[in-house]
Structures are given as C-alpha cells and as structure tokens.
Image (cartoon, rainbow, N blue to C red):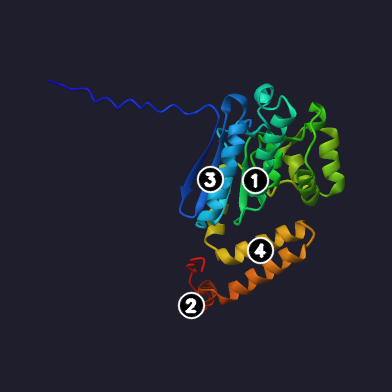
C-alpha cells in the first residue's frame, strides 16, 4: 500500500497590520507589515514599535538594528489614514495618537546602537520620518521619497523637522517639506538622504549591521551618544555623559582585547565590557 505524505496544516494567519522582530546573533531586524496599504503605520503598529525599541534597549544585546518594510513595494508609506476616522477624530484621540508616534520616533532616535534603514519602494510621510531617525539609510532603485504633510494639511512635529534639517541642511529640508514632491532614489542620494543605492538593499543593510556588530560595542555606543548630543545642541549634561562613556571605553576589557588583537594581527572578539 502506498501512502501520500501531507504537510501539517498551519493555523497561523499573519496579522494584516503588525511589526515583527527577528534576531541574528547581535543584529535585530524590525519589519513593518501592512502590505495591503503599502506598510502604512497603524496606531497599534506605532505602539508596538515603541514597545520593541524599549525592550531591545533594555536587553543590551543588540549591537545593530535594521528597519525594513514587508515585501519590496514599500518601506513605510506613512500613517494609515484609513483609521483616522476612528483613531484621530477628536482632540483627545489626536493627542493619544501623536504621543504614540512621538514615543516610537524618540525611542528610535535615542536607540543605543546604530540603526539602519533598508528602503525598498515607497517611503513617504511617517516612513520618511522613521528613515531620518536612523543612522544609516540604504535604498533600492525602486525607492521613492516624499514628505506630503503640506498636501494633507497635517502639522509636523518640531523634532522631525529638526532632524530633517540636521541631515539635509535647511535649504534642502525646506524644499522637501514645502514642495511635498516625490524624489526617486538618485535624487534622494543627491540630497544627502541616502548612504547608497543597492541592487539588494536588504542584503546590504544586513551585511552592514553584521560589520557594525563585530566592532567594539562601547565605542560604537559612545560615538552614537556624541552624534545625538551634537544634534541636540551639545547640552552640557549630554556632553558629560559622552565623556564618561569614552572613559569607560578605555577602562574596558574590549580595549585590552582590541590592542592585543592588533598586536597579534587577528580579528578582535569584543564582548561589550
């Protein structure tokens, strides 16, 4: 008697709107998934993103983080406007929604380790804000960028405008915001928005994250603290914290390991201590 092998039937149904986390050693990847709406961010997605970022920061094992969209059609197309009637219909709801977005954006900008955006397809509005909150941005040839707030009548928070201006400069940031026009990948590269245009943007982002994760974590974190302090106007308290982080690098086991590896002509093995 012959038998036919049948694969077990899975009951898992991927949620329509969600944010997924995956890990590869010390590299974390967060994927925005709302494919029917080009990965537009719903309120629940903003809230989950904030939760994930805070948990990953507390864990301390992540040395690099990659952000990407589900599929190749979009990174994030902005906020999910289809739910505005339910979630942003009165002042209290607007305040609640804005708080969720602000919390996620701040957690991303202040994430202790470098964050890399892998951008394929549409990157509009809130998606562009997410990309600008990252440290490095790589895009595919298909990537398109737009800040459409002025076409929608939306106000845009000071923090987002400040970061856009810090990265692009005032003249280019003003053009992006005031015109609300669409930029292709090459135009975005010329603006200074991107680090590069890649054939396989997801592979490039992951390879870069792996490379970063093999470097001394305390050194990388001290450098990111310094970049953020400079962006915030060199607040004395932040500068002092950077100085302490730099001193800790010189007191660390990783500093001894780095010197030994250099002398022995081998790759260092850093532990973050």
Of the two numbered discs 1 and 2 on the same chain, state the one appearing first in sequence.
Answer: 1
Location of residue 150 by image quarter: top right
Mark 1–mark 4 distance (CA, rounded to whole Å): 20 Å
In the depicted structure, whether residue 100 falls above or below residue 10: below
| Mark 3 or mark 2, whichever is nearer to me | 3
Disc ID at residue 264:
2
Residue 136 % position (x, y)? 66, 50
SS type, badge 3: strand
Q: How packed is label 1: few (under 14 Cα within 10 Å), some, or many (20 or more)?
A: many
SS type, badge 4: helix
Disc 1 designates what residue?
A: 138
| Mark 4 or mark 2, whichever is nearer to me | 4
What residue is drawn where x is 51% and y is 52%? 27
What residue is drawn where x is 85% and y is 39%? 175
Residue 222 % position (x, y)? 64, 65
Disc ID at residue 223:
4
| Mark 3 or mark 1, whichever is nearer to me | 3
Mark 4–mark 3 distance (CA, rounded to whole Å): 21 Å
Of the two numbered discs 3 and 1 on the same chain, state the one appearing first in sequence.
Answer: 3
């Amino acid at each position: 008697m012959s038998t036919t092998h049948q694969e077990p039937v899975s009951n898992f149904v991927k949620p329509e709107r969600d944010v997924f986390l995956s890990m590869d050693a010390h590299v974390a990847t967060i994927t925005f998934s709302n494919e029917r709406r080009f990965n537009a961010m719903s309120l629940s997605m903003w809230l989950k993103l904030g939760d994930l970022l805070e948990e990953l920061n507390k864990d301390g094992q992540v040395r690099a983080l990659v952000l990407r969209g589900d599929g190749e059609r979009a990174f994030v197309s902005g906020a999910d406007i289809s739910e505005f009637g339910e979630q942003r219909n009165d002042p209290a709801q607007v305040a609640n929604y804005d708080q969720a977005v602000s919390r996620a954006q701040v957690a991303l900008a202040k994430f202790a380790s470098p964050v890399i955006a892998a951008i394929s397809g549409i990157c509009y509005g809130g998606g562009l804000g997410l990309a600008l909150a990252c440290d490095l941005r790589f895009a595919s040839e298909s990537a398109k960028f737009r800040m459409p707030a002025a076409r929608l009548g939306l106000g845009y928070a000071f923090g987002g405008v400040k970061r856009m201006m810090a990265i692009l400069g005032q003249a280019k940031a003003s053009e992006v915001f005031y015109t609300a026009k669409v930029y292709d990948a090459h135009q975005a590269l010329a603006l200074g928005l991107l680090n590069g245009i890649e054939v396989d943007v997801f592979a490039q982002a992951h390879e870069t994250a792996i490379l970063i994760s093999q470097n001394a974590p305390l050194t990388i974190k001290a450098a990111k603290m310094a970049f953020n302090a400079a962006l915030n106007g060199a607040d004395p308290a932040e500068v002092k914290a950077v100085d302490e982080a730099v001193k800790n690098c010189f007191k660390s086991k990783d500093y001894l390991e780095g010197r030994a590896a250099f002398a022995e002509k081998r790759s260092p093995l850093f532990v973050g201590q």
